[in-house]
Each structure stands twice: as structure tokens, then as C-alpha cells.
Amino acid sequence: MTGTPPPTPAAPRPADLLIVDAEIVTMAPGREVVTGGAIAVTAGRIAALGPADALRAAYPGSPELDAAGCVVVPGLVNAHQHTTADPLVRSSIPDDVPAQQAIYDWIVPLHAAVTGDDDELSATLTAVEALSYGVTTLLEPGTVAHPLRVARGLRAAGIRARVGGWGWDTPGAPYALPAAEALVAQADTVAALAGDDLVTGWITLLGHDLVSDELFTGAAEPAERVDVPMTWHISPGPDDVTAYAAAGRARPVLHLRDLGVLGPRLLLGHAVWLDDAELAALVDSGTAVAACPGAYLRLGQGVSRAGRHTELRRAGDRLALGCDSHNAGDTPDVWRAARLFAGLERDRGTPDPLRADEVFALATIDGADAVGLGRTTGSIEVGKAADLVVLDTRTISWAPRGDLATQLVWGAAGHTVRDVLVDGRLVVRDRRVTTVDVDALREEATARRAALLRRAGIDIPHRWPTVPATEHCARPAEPAAAAPPL
């Protein structure tokens, strides 16, 4: 009797990369930390985890990344990071002006003067900085004028991102459009970025009290039709509550509930100033929140008095961390955001504050879940994207080793990032970004900063005088102050 012979087993094929001899913080449901482990990366995905020898046998001839003495963690998620205008004038808005003055005297004129070239460059600048901190996913919650140029800049750096152009219909505001036109622009941006594996579009409204009810409710239709999420800003400080009351509206989150726009598809930026009913409305609707603690402190928005993010999380709401903008959070460093969040919640006297392990989850898997990317990134599991960060624990700040979760959060371990992969691609190797000429980026950013400030008519105040060395040396020496008596 004859028959078809069984097929010949396929010969083992090499992986694109093996990361070997690592301590792996999986952030999988069991929160296992795998010691002496290896990760096989194939076609941008995590193909296998296990002992190095076993993976070498399964994927013979694979190139290797030696992670001996290193901890590998999932790439961090920045759920609220503006990338336009502000990066070119970072740390320039005075820190002694109210938040509203910072917005209308500084940020609005800058955005009114920004060009497409500026936006693309500033997006690349932000992404490169974020990658250097081990942030592999960045959600842009609204660029004002040139979202497709922003997407191009983010793509050049190699980061995973979502991008949208701000929708707002406040008469007389820069780039504002009537509600119907704003909705068309939103849909056009999403369509233009469809099919991109890394940089995708979403519906982004400005929010606050600067969006009409027509635009709020209208945004839900294209989001539902093309199956994309939405985001906008609400209540980072008390001003939205005051403005909604002056307009005869319910409190901001309750007004959004009454409009029918809360829900799992929506990520709200901030949501700091909430009352009990608003907190319950967010939890009941499954609306996610991105908390940006550094920005609230920088702008003096009262988070230490009013913040309720731990209550939201304990009640089962979806919570992520963000860094906001370069003139609010000042740096897209999610490690710092995690540490600030943990400290603020403890110092406020919040009952049952989130522990370090829970805060690190906000920066990784819980943050990814909150923004709808939990099946793609946020943990080190077979089948997920190879968004990975290698931390060099041979640096002195890791000696001696303590509890790993505590050290990751309270040690703000971003300064020990050595290598970063996004979708399996090494975008940072030995602390150097591989995708962009950083020296050229720095030079162009410096030139564009000066030109943007000229167009916006803004002079940056400097706290300390700048004195040439020749002039300083020519001055008579000042007598030293007398030491105080003991």
C-alpha cells in the first residue's frame, strides 16, 4: 500500500534577535520576573521566552544582544504627550505665572506661528527624547495645525504613536473651524494614517470649555464608524468647573455624560478636579483617564489638594500616565511621572495609595490597557509586540539591589536605559538613538527655536544675567560675606 509521505519538517530558522541572559520583568498577569532568561524576537513580535540555551537551539544562528547584568522591562506608555511648538521652546514659560496666562500669553501665540517644518521637527525631537527614556508608545493628544507632519516626525524616530489634529470651534481661535468642518478634518487625519503599523490616527478634541456640544457629540460618530479612540482635555485645574457653571452647564464630566460621549472609547486628559458624582460617572462608563502629575505641579493646578486618581483606579477605572508638554511636564519622562504620581498620592494622605508595583503597571500594562493597546504592548508575553527596554543595572544607582518594583519607580530608573526596541527594531543601542542624527537634530532645533520666537513676538525672560568671561574677570572682586556667628 502506498501513500503520500509525511512532509519534511521545516528546518529551524534564526530569529531576528535573541536578547540573552536577562532578568525579565514581564508585567504579565502573574507579574513574574524571569531570571537568567532570553527573549526571541521575530517579525517585530516576541516569539518565545525561555532559557538562552533552549532559544539558541530553537533559533540557531540568531544575532544576540547580551543583557547580562541587565533588567528588561516592557516599553513604557506615555498616554498624554504634546509634541508640537513647546519642544522647540522647552522650559521657557516662567514658572511664576498662572496656568491660564501661560496658555494665552505664551502657548497660543507659539502655536499660531508654528510651521509644518517646526511641527515635524519638534515631534521628532520629542520622540527621540522619549525613546532615550525607554518610552516606546506615545499618544499625542492634539497638535494644532499639522498632524500629518507630526506623524512623519514621530515615524522618523521609530516610536509607536497615535496622532490627531485638535478639533475646536471657538470663534476667533487659531485654526478653529465650525463643528462640521472640524469633524471632516478629524476623519481626514484618521484616514490618512490608516494602514500605518506604528503611527495611527485618533479623534482629538481640545476639550475644556472650548468645544461646542455639537462638536463633542459629533466626534463620537466618526470614532465609532472607523473604530478609533478619542481624547480631549478636562478639568486639570478648577477653571473648567467655573466656566461650565458660568455657562449654566452641569459640572464638566457630568455634562459629557449627559451628552452621551463618555465610554470605553474615550481617554480624558487630566480629570483632576472631580466631585463624587463625576468620579462615579467615569467609573460607570469605563472612560479612561491620563494623569500628568508633573504638569499639574509645574502649572500649580492644585493636584495635591484635588487629585483623585487613586480613587478612580481603586474603583476600577482605567488609568494611565502622561507628561503633557515641554512647558508643563518639561520632559517626556514617564519614570519621573510615575515617581511624582506615587509621591503625591502618598503625601496627600490618600487612603490605600497605589504601591510601587501598581504605579509601574500604570506606566506599562495598565497604561496600555487604558489606551486600548493592551493586546499589543505593555507586557513581555509571546505574541505581543517586541517593545522592550534594557536597563543597565551595573550602574551605581542599582547597587545594592532592593525590591525590583520599588527600585524601578522610586529610583526613577530612566537614566539607566541602555537599549530600546520598538516593534522589534533597535531604536536605541548603547544609549545612542539609531534612527536619527541627534547632533543634526539638536542644531536644527536650536535654529528653529530662535525663528519661532521671533515670529511669535516672544522674548524669553532669563532669571540670571549672562556675562562674557572677559567682562566678568575685569570686574573688581566682591568681598565675601561674613560667616554667621556660631
Image (cartoon, rainbow, N blue to C red):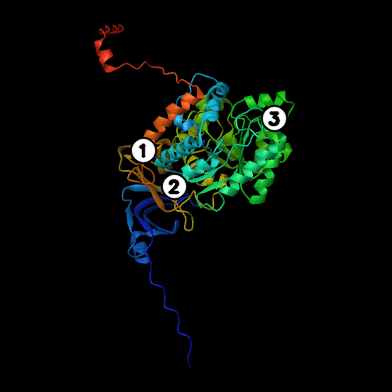
Real-space CA distance between mark 2 and mark 1, rounded to the nearest whole angstrom:
17 Å
Look at the image and tell me whether residue 211 can be seen.
yes
Q: Which residue is identified by label 2?
A: 158
Q: Which residue is identified by label 1?
A: 440
> Which element type, helix, strand or loop, lies under badge 1?
helix
Q: Quadrant of the rendered structure where residue 266 is?
A: top right
Real-space CA distance between mark 1 and mark 3, rounded to the nearest whole angstrom:
48 Å
Pinpoint residue 139: horizontal percent, then vertical percent.
53, 41
> Which element type, helix, strand or loop, lies under badge 2?
loop
Q: Is residue 481 left or right of residue 442?
A: left
Q: Which residue is identified by label 3?
A: 251
Mark sitting earlier along the chain (2/1)? 2
Q: Are marks 1 and 3 in contact (CB under 8 Å)?
A: no
Pinpoint residue 413: horizontal percent, then vertical percent.
39, 39
Please, what is the three-letter code of the amino acid marked with disc 2?
Gly
Residue 31 vs residue 106, the one in the foreground: 106
Q: Residues within 10 Å of mark 1 (few under 14, many from 20)?
A: few
- Mark 3 or 2: in front is 2
The residue lying at 38 percent from left, 43 percent from top is 436
Residue 336 vs residue 193, the one in the foreground: 193
Please, what is the three-letter code of the amino acid marked with disc 3?
Arg
Q: Residues within 10 Å of mark 3 (few under 14, many from 20)?
A: many
Mark sitting earlier along the chain (1/3)? 3
Mark sitting earlier along the chain (3/2)? 2
The residue lying at 30 percent from left, 38 percent from top is 396
Real-space CA distance between mark 3 and mark 2, rounded to the nearest whole angstrom:
40 Å
Look at the image and tell me whether residue 343 can be seen.
no
Q: Quadrant of the C terminus?
A: top left
Please, what is the three-letter code of the amino acid marked with disc 1?
Ala
